[in-house]
Image: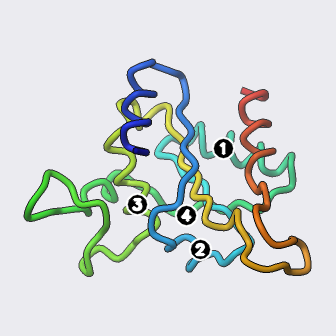
Amino acid sequence: MLADGLIDASAQKPELIIDAATLTGAAKTALGNDYTRCSALTMRWRIACWRALRRKNEAFWRLPLAEFHRNQLPSNFADLNNTGSAAYPAGASTAAGFLSHFVENYHQGWLHIDCSATYRKSAVEQWSAGATGLGVRTIANLLTAE
């Protein structure tokens, strides 16, 4: 369904598409529960996201996403696999690379937010149990600033 949404959004020819999803749990493994991952193939949107999160003091971190991550999803049965293999273990990056295949203008107008850290099973010092809302203020700030 996320792929369908990205395809449909692309058909509208927007300046920017933002998706917020978690596909593999790899970003949470890399960053823990306290950071949300932000990635884009375009420096403009990386910088814009970074500025927005700094203004809102939210804990985001940029994990690598490069063109070659899009090509690390081979399949013997389909055009594309939805997860990397043992030969390509960069799960968070290949997951974002997978999503990029469904965004027509992925080089210029796409931002992926891995939201695996936006929910807590139990309370901790800075969060109560449940949804944290982490990232909502950053996205709102990004959209109003741009």
State the separation of the CA atoms marked 4 and 1. Answer: 13 Å
Mark 2: which amino acid?
A: Lys
- Numbered disc 4: secondary structure: loop
Q: In 3D space, how far apart are the residues under numbered discs 3 and 1 (Cα atoms)?
A: 21 Å
Q: Secondary structure at mark 3?
A: helix
Of the residues under marks 1 and 2, which one precedes in the sequence?
A: 2
Q: Earlier in the sequence, mark 3 or mark 4?
A: 4
Q: Of circles 1 and 2, which is in front?
A: 2
How far apart, in angstroms, are the residues tagged by discs 2 and 3? 13 Å
Mark 4 neighbour density, 10 Å: few (under 14) some (14–19) many (20 or more):
some
Disc 3 marks which residue?
Answer: 95
Crowding at mark 2 (Cα within 10 Å: few <14, some 14-19, many 20+): some
**Quarter holding the N terminus?**
top left
Q: Between 122 and 18, which is closer to the camera in this rendering?
A: 122
Local SS, label 2: helix
Q: How many marks?
A: 4
**Which three-letter amino acid code belongs to the residue tagged 1?**
Ile
User: Mark 1 and mark 2: span between their CA atoms?
Assistant: 22 Å
Between disc 2 and disc 3, whose residue precedes?
2
Taking the spot 52% from the left edge, 47% from the top edge, the residue there is 40
Which of the two marks, 4 or 1, is nearer to us in this view?
4
**Disc number for residue 47:** 1
- Identify the residue at image location x=46%, y=66%: 92
State which quadrant residue 134 falls in.
Answer: bottom right
Of callouts 2 and 4, the N-terminal one: 2
Quickly name the residue at label 4. 63
Q: Indicate the amino acid at tag 4.
A: Leu
Image side of residue 110 versus residue 81, left or right: right
Residue where numbered disc 2 is placed: 28
